[in-house]
Image (cartoon, rainbow, N blue to C red):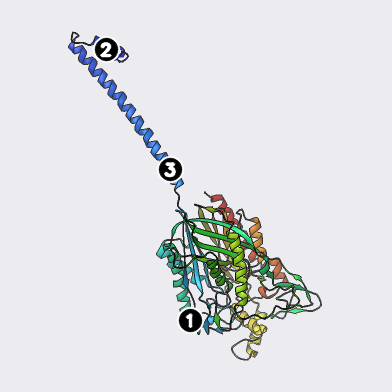
Amino acid sequence: MNKREIFNTPQAELSRSVGPESDPFMAFGLLRTFCLKFFKTGFAFLHLSILLISQFLIDTQVGFAQASKVFRAGAATSVISPAIGTSINGNMKDVLIKQIHDDTHARCIVLDDGKTKLVLLTVDLCMIYREELDAAKKRAHDLTGIPVENMMMSATHTHSGGTACSVFQSDPDQDYLKFLRVRIADAVVRANNNLVPARIGWAVGNEPSQVFNRRWKMKPGKPLMNPFGTEDRVKMNPGMGNPDRLEPAGPVDPGLPVISIQSAEGRPIAILANYSLHYVGGTAPGEISADYFGMFAQRMEELLESKEDRFPPFVAMLSNGTSGNINNINWFANEPAPALPPYTKMRQVANIVAAEAYKTYQNIKYNNWISLSSVQKEIILGVRLPAQKEIERAKDIVAKANGPIMNTAEEIYARETLLIKDFPKQVPLIIQAFRLGDLAITAAPCEIFVEIGLDIKEKSPFKPTFTTSLANGYNGYLPTPEHHQLGGYETWRARSSYLEVEASTKISNLIFELLQKLKKEQVD
């Protein structure tokens, strides 16, 4: 019997073939061959089994990892109220603080998809220098590790906050700027410390009752003189019942995007809304207030029944959309609205916008996980510097003014001309875009005209998309080239409006480039 026969022979027959009467050496050889063959076959089977089990475990781990992606979020605030006796931003003449009506805040949300963290932060200021925000971002990065490029920080544009940027006749207190750097960074650090598993969703509401274009075309025949001695073709805030009104010089954006973040159990963590309304105003003299932005946050806390003593704390915030030429005054009316006590109009507007945000909130569908990404790029833009003839005219006007405080529009803008003549020929701006799943947020450091924001919403590859103004610095108004041709307050050269005429076109083109980059790199 050969080896092949042995291994193909049933065990009982093999026993009969190899018995005590057989040659013992032959029996030993056959037994040795059988054992070697058995162990070789058994080892191959064992090796195959190990490979199959390993692949099963790998597949299981991958599936488990995909199913167990954890989205996290945290929110926090820092009080940034300035000292009484320092400057309030937002007026043609400086105003000193006499009282704090309601504390101003830095409000922050940190989002984390497990790979990327994004920071969304608003500060209750009229505007703030890029240098201060850069310092705050660096400190926040040093303490959290979050890249500064992943931080979007914007001013709400309250006209009753502390001065953080030299505009018109208000200049910041240097101690306040140092304080802001620390407190803004603290809001980021605290929000990052408050990260918990979360879910996120969004929807877009519509509130047309509080947005009106404030730039109006007027009937021909009466010249619209500006502080530079030339004529404009439009007028900001034309006056109630003015018989020379023709029509608004542009549209409005009533959209109210609302992003809601909840804990894994469904408890509110944060609300971020965006509305294209300049501000409301109507404070008592010399009082600090976050304007309707702060009152909106307070009202949303009430509507969602979210108390600050819970963990993580609930934070609502409202960023300023593209409102450079928008306010809440109905210029179609023929009679002025009745005078109201201080803060009454703010509260009315805040309640109306919050009601729409709350209604929108009811329809939000949540995602347990989304991917996050960001991109930003610096753009260099030209400055509209005054000509020598304009400088000489400004010197003459300032020299004839009565005292160090400029009183008339002509005097104020003459002073601005003398200040801006020393600006560089070009300035750098940060342009930024965030992606939250299929939603995008774009940002620029300007008071952006509504036409620009509407154009970005329409052409963006992400739906929805909204734009945050006054983000990552301050470079004045951003009218379109067409609005520059019309003139008007928002185009008057000053530290509040100095970028080149084509600035909006160049910024919009860069924003579309950044959005396309986010779309190309999107991974869900």
Q: Which residue is the site of mark 2?
A: 14
Q: Total label count?
A: 3
- Tell which circle, 1 or 3, labels the residue nearer the N-terminal end: 3
Q: Identity of the amino acid at label 2?
A: Leu
Q: Is mark 1 on a helix, strand or loop?
A: loop
Task: Check if mark 2's residue and mark 3's residue have beta carbons within 8 Å.
Answer: no
Label 2 Cα crowd, 10 Å radius (few <14 / some 14-19 / many 20+): some
Task: Check if mark 1's residue and mark 3's residue have beta carbons within 8 Å.
Answer: no
Judged by depth in the image, the label closer to the viewer, 2 or 3, is 2
Task: Check if mark 1's residue and mark 2's residue have beta carbons within 8 Å.
Answer: no
Spot occupied by residue 387 in the image (x, y as percentages of width and height): 66, 77
User: How far, Cα to Cα, is label 2 from label 3?
Assistant: 49 Å
Label 1 Cα crowd, 10 Å radius (few <14 / some 14-19 / many 20+): some
Q: Which residue lies furthest to the bottom in this view?
A: 402
Spot occupied by residue 198 in the image (x, y as percentages of width and height): 47, 56
Q: Which residue is the site of mark 3?
A: 62
User: How far, Cα to Cα, is label 1 from label 3?
Assistant: 55 Å
Give the camera-side residue of 480 and 468.
468
Q: Using the image, tell me which numbered label, if any, was put on residue 163.
A: none
Q: Identity of the amino acid at label 3?
A: Val
Q: Which residue is the site of mark 1?
A: 83
Q: Is residue 383 above or below residue 149?
A: below
- Tell which circle, 1 or 2, labels the residue nearer the N-terminal end: 2
Res 353 visible: yes
Spot occupied by residue 329 in the image (x, y as percentages of width and height): 68, 74
